[in-house]
Image: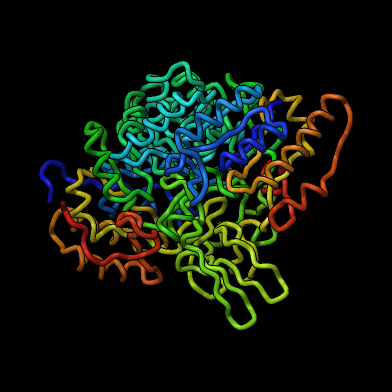
Amino acid sequence: MELICPAGTPASFRDAVEAGADAVYCGFRDETNARNFPGLNFNAQELTEAATHARANGVSTLVAINTYMRAGAEELWYRAVDNAATAGADAIIVADLGLLAYAAERHPALRRHLSVQAAAANVEHINFLVDAFGIKRVVLPRVLTVAEVGAICRKARCETEVFVFGGLCVMEEGRCSLSSYATGKSPNMDGVCSPASHVRYRQDGSDMVSELGDFTINRFPKDEPTGYPTLCKGRFVAGGTAGYVFEDPASLDVLTHLEALARFGVSALKIEGRQRGRAYIAQVVREIRNRLDGLAAGEQREDGATLRKLSEGQRTTQGSYDKRWR
Amino acid sequence: MAAGHRIGLTLGPLLYLWDQPSWSDFYRRVADEVEVDTVVLGEIVCSKRDHFHAGAIERIAERLTAAGKRVRLGSPALVTIEREAKTVRQLAARSDYELEAGELSAHAAMEGRPHAIGPLVNVYNAPTAKVLAARGAVSICLPPELPLASMRSIIAGAPDIAFEVFAFGKVPLAISARCAHARNKGLVKDNCQFVCGEDPDGLPVDTLDGQHFLALNGVQTMSSTCQSLITDVPALADAGVRSLRLSPQVCDMVRVAGLFRSVADGRLEPEAAHSQLKQCYPTAAFSNGFLHAVPGHRLIGDRLSAL
């Protein structure tokens, strides 16, 4: 199984290559990618340099162009695909059907991966896009159990890629407008979720209050560390109970299922976190690489504690991969 | 109002789990009293609810057809297990009623035969609409978060498709594998005891500071506000929108449809209709922010420029 690592900057790209990634994914510095955060991402020149460096080290470069094209501004997305091809990318990661059609027609030799943002949760959906646009790989949405991942691997006529570590979307990816409901900025259209530009922290008595747009997302008493107000990981009141209505502030860790994923024939394991710092990326990559090498050698090399320290709120979940989570 | 088409009204699928008497009463009224052209039937949110109304849907579909309404059958929004895939295949095999695709496996299953695309399929631009139209999509309900400028561009770029807009109802904002509704009541999805049925208009989710924010509907998360584009109907007509989708809520849907019909026909001023709409659904706060390219929960009073 390939290990696919995120890179938000040219520096973290080089770190991921050095730490043992088989492929690195990144995006352009605009709304064509779903991690359109200030201070992150690549211009065409930086991507060319990164892809050249990667290739020299036997590492692939995947370019995420995985937001939905804004009507009337499609050229921006088309140019992103052209630029990825020119830069020497090994594949593009795309969600929008119109953009897939463009890429298949104009750049037939450039591998097309279906982004998790396309929410292809069943084999009929996936195989339809294999037939229509020649997608070579699907990144599976985080709505499936481990067994369901296995069932898709058996029948899909393309490779599969699975998220194993990092942030967890509680909602099906690419089908969530919670952020634009609160802030006007959405993952699908703007490449952002719960954007920092709309976050405020406010002291209220001894509580620290975190807000997103016009809404309170959480309150932290004095002795509790303040977390970032990601909308679906906020504390709210429903049915008379206050708490984490959708999900606790935890991140995804399904490394305990590596053996099963290998058995299913999953092609690639993906680490979330293009917004993360260099040290984080390097450490996570090294740790998971070590486990994969252990798996190949028939040894168990586990160090859950090291990775847990790197996780959001230092808590992890298996998300939908564990049936009981649902 | 734009020349050309009479704007139609579509009653979207009931997104909540209503008990049998409420469900039957509602659809009998729809057949006999509600001024809509098209009615979408079917359980699209959660396949665990399928058995509640599966039998009654056939009878209601016949009754609606006899009453002169066009019936569509909605396919599930999230298809991950064999039972859901089977539902999609069965719907796609029918020739009596049009299918409305909740996700792309249903579109694929139609193999080019005519069908509708529901609002939870991501159609953000004309090239995407044309990809779907080339494979049989004849109508598309656009995603609720789209601003008017995008709608205009899409409609202008794909003039052969009949576009519909989500014009009334709490907005379906997200869907998850996890049932937050069951979880809130101390249960998990596999043993949910259908507790979502206790909240026929959604379970309110408020902030810790007491602001109304969202609503739970099983695995689906809705807006707390009821989106209403009634004051925007002239702008939507001008953009070339062919039908307005009304999503059932616990309110006087007969009157809601009547108000939209009157505004669409130019018989009632949009602002007057908005005031009356509040009487139809007194517990609701209204919003139209998505259309105006501001946060979706907001209500913009000024009419959009027809330009």
Identify the residue at image location x=12%, y=47%: B2
Image x and y of residue B23, in percent? 45, 53
Image x and y of residue A107, in percent? 42, 19
Could you tell me if residue B149 is visible in this image?
Answer: yes
Identify the residue at image location x=75%, y=26%: A262
Q: Is residue A3 left or right of residue B48?
A: right
The image quadrant of residue A302 is top right
Considering every residue shown, the one lying at the far right of the view is: A299
Q: Is residue A277 left or right of residue B255?
A: right
Identify the residue at image location x=49%, y=44%: A175
Up-down: is A225 above or below A196? below
Image x and y of residue A156, in percent? 59, 22
Could you tell me if residue B54 is visible in this image?
Answer: no
Up-down: is A121 above or below B41? above
Task: Please tell me which residue lies in front, B96 or A119.
Answer: A119
Q: Is residue A144 left or right of residue B149?
A: right
The image quadrant of residue A16 is top right
Identify the residue at image location x=22%, y=55%: B233
